[in-house]
Image (cartoon, rainbow, N blue to C red):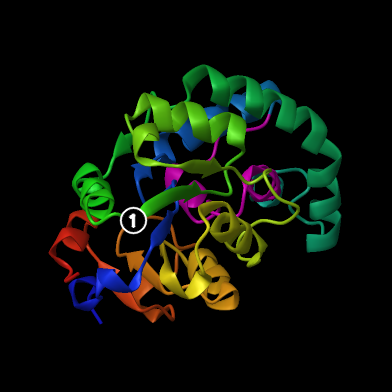
């Protein structure tokens, strides 16, 4: 099903993901992670590898990057098993997290760009009278300045980072809490995202879900994900009836 076949009159609100849905932030991730790795005297990793790690929160991203480097053939620890490598990554986490935050806050938004059609799509949703919330696994301290830098904050009634609630997507709790904040029922709240994380959270929360065909889906084909529709651009939502 394509999103234009969705009847927007069915919805009172929409919850919109950030990274990979509205903003291509892969450049920010790559710069910050590789500066972090340099601080730890570890080698850089390519953007293509980083892209598959994005979407489950900064903690997961950092641990995945550390494990990737420690398991590389050039690493002195490459012969160790997965559990041992994970333990080494965990031991480095506190210092890595400190350096990552330092670098990310310094360059937040400088190596990222809005996807085509985002402004048009958000404007179309607001024009239909939908209330909007941004819900991301990115920490709130990163998400809110990015929304402001890209001219997006004015579209949203609420912006929830990955540290706003006890659990992150794909757990349904953040979507349920966002619906409570918006004052809308889940079945009348559309989730718009770019990955299986968003879809799984939406299904479990009882929200219909539309996925963009670009973005970061952990290296897996997006159209294989269980969703109610797919769009190549958020601007397509403006063509939906309602």
Residue 137, x across and y down, in percent? 58, 49
Residue 177, x across and y down, in percent? 63, 57
Residue 117 located within the stretch drawn in magenta: no
Q: Residue at x 81, y 36 (%)?
A: 92
Q: Secondary structure at mark 1?
A: loop
Q: Where, by quadrant of the figure, is residue 201 drawn?
A: bottom right
Where's the N terminus, which quadrant?
bottom left
Left or right: where 21 falls relative to 72: left
Judge by depth and name the residue closer to the eye, 56 or 83.
56
Residue 165 in the image: above or below residue 30:
below
Where's the C terminus, which quadrant?
bottom left
Q: Where, by quadrant of the figure, is residue 193 drawn?
A: bottom left
* Residue stretch rendered in magenta on the structure: 42-68
Q: Residue furthest top?
A: 106
Q: Residue at x 68, y 43 (%)?
A: 163
Q: Where, by quadrant of the figure, is residue 214 drawn?
A: bottom left
Q: Which residue is mark 1?
A: 130
Residue 90, x across and y down, in percent? 82, 45
Left or right: where 239 falls relative to 84: left
């Amino acid at each position: 099903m394509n999103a234009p076949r969705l009847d927007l009159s069915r919805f009172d609100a929409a919850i919109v993901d950030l990274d990979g849905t509205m903003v291509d932030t892969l450049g920010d991730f790559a710069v910050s992670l590789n500066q972090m790795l340099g601080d730890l005297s570890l080698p850089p990793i390519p953007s293509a590898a980083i892209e598959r790690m994005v979407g489950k929160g900064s903690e997961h991203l950092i641990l995945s990057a550390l494990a990737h480097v420690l398991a590389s053939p050039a690493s002195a620890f490459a012969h160790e098993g997965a559990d041992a490598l994970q333990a080494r990554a965990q031991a480095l986490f506190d210092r890595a997290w400190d350096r990552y935050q330092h670098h990310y806050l310094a360059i937040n938004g400088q190596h990222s760009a809005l996807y085509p059609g985002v402004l048009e799509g958000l404007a179309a949703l607001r024009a239909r009278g939908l209330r909007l919330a941004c819900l991301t696994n990115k920490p709130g301290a990163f998400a809110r300045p990015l929304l402001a830098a890209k001219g997006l904050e004015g579209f949203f009634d609420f912006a929830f980072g990955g540290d706003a609630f006890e659990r992150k997507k794909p757990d349904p709790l953040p979507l349920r809490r966002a619906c409570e904040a918006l004052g809308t029922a889940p079945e009348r709240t559309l989730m718009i995202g770019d990955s299986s994380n968003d879809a799984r959270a939406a299904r479990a929360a009882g929200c219909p879900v539309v996925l963009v065909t670009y973005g970061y889906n952990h290296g897996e084909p997006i159209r294989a994900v269980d969703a109610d529709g797919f769009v190549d651009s958020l601007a397509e939502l403006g063509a939906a009836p309602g």
